[in-house]
Image (cartoon, rainbow, N blue to C red):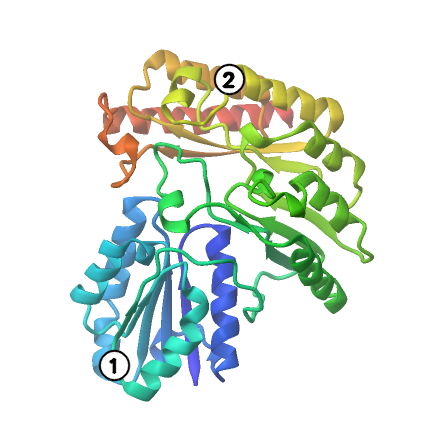
Amino acid sequence: MLYHIVTYGCQMNVHESEKIAGMLEDLGYSPTDKREDADIIVFNTCAIREGAEDRAFGNIGALKQLKKQDRNKIIAVCGCMTQQKQVAEKIFKTFPFVDIVVGTHNLYLLEKLIKRKLNENKRILDYMESSPVIEGIPTKRTSGDNAWINIMYGCNNFCTYCIVPYVRGREMSRKKQDILDEIKEVIDTKCYKTITLLGQNVNSYGNDSKENGNFAELINDICKLDGDFKLTFMTSHPKDLSDELIEAIKNNDKVIKEIHLPVQSGSTKILKAMNRNYTREHYLDLIKKLRDAVPDIRITTDIIVGFPGETEQDFEDTCSLVKQVKYDGIFAFMYSKRSGTIAATMPNQVDESVKNYRVNYLLNLEKEIKAQKG
């Protein structure tokens, strides 16, 4: 029996696909690169942009012919798209050849749902509004010598452009000992050189349960573990980047001296409209603290151009911040409306041609800075 997984979206989804693979291999399936050969195909979807959903719908629809050729082939769709109840129901109704639809909160049940499908031969739509942290899900690590380790789930930030809090739920930190135990297992295999801690906002680890301590304390405890490994993490939110964490990065040799610190905009006015809860000045102060503590630290960022109400001056503020910080890498995106978010209903939406010009200008600016840095 063979399985094929299609993964969309962020590193969190990549790691969850590793868990999907672990559950499938528990059932006796083996991986295949060819979906036409697979006995079960799983689409692990992303909902961060409507374009991602549209592509997923198109690719799911393309499976209809494969299902016609083999009625016993199981097709499952999971991930952030299907955590939106209306989308999950739409997939179940629109694509009758899809056998299982399951969201992010009950993904851990996939193994049981596949068994149910095999035993009862009935289509399954399984949806849960929320879920506690579930430990012990089998994992088939597929990311080379890097091991992803979730330290928390969900997000409390509610940036006005972002759907994540609605599909991932509120922040829930894993117990520190469970994290340390998983990392010890990874280290003991001697297969992984890098451990990457994952969370929608790793800096807020422990805020929901003081018994775990904070993120800086977790970093320090991990670095005390025996073993030959390097430690990194993503993604950091500027509003929660503490002096204590900067010290943990500085003082632990096992921590890779890099940080991905999304600024999103260089305009305080736009940052307020985005509900980012920091100012341009605060962000630049964080950059100074990081470079004072770790002069050779590598800093990358995310930037959204064309957010509703972004004027030419706001965009110039972003460009001037980029010139000042001199990032080692920029991931630039044109703002796109996301149904269900506050920004989608905001006035003064920016014209597509303006957004296109600004994102290209920003990417060219990044190239110039890299050339100057050599």
Q: Nearer the viewer, residue 4 or 293?
A: 293
Which quarter of the picture shows residue 6?
bottom left
Image quarter where the C terminus lies is top right
Q: Position of residue 332 (x, y in %)?
A: 43, 33
Q: Label 2 belongs to which residue?
A: 280
Q: CA distance from mark 2 to mark 1?
A: 54 Å
Q: Position of residue 44 (x, y in %)?
A: 39, 61
Instruction: Name the residue located 52 percent from the left edge and 80 percent from the top edge.
Output: 26
Instruction: Name the residue located 70 percent from the left edge and 63 percent from the top edge.
Output: 186
Which quarter of the picture shows residue 117?
bottom left
From this view, report whether residue 210 is shown above or below residue 30.
above
Instruction: Name the residue located 53 percent from the left edge and 72 percent from the top edge.
Output: 22
- Amino acid under disc 1: Lys
Q: Position of residue 232 (x, y in %)?
A: 66, 45
Q: Position of residue 339 (x, y in %)?
A: 25, 41
From this view, report whether residue 29 is shown above or below residue 137.
below
From this view, report whether residue 70 is shown above or below residue 100.
below
Q: Label 1 belongs to which residue?
A: 122
As drawn, which residue projects farthest toward the left?
A: 94
As drawn, which residue projects farthest toward the top?
A: 313
Say which element carries label 1: loop
Q: Earlier in the sequence, mark 2 or mark 1?
A: 1
Say which element carries label 2: helix
Q: Nearer the viewer, residue 324 or 249?
A: 249
Disc 1 crowd rating (10 Å Cα; few below 14, some 14-19, many 20+) is: few
Q: Could you say which disc has been placed on residue 108 in the image? A: none
Image quarter where the N terminus lies is bottom left
- Amino acid under disc 2: Arg
Q: Nearer the viewer, residue 357 or 54?
A: 54
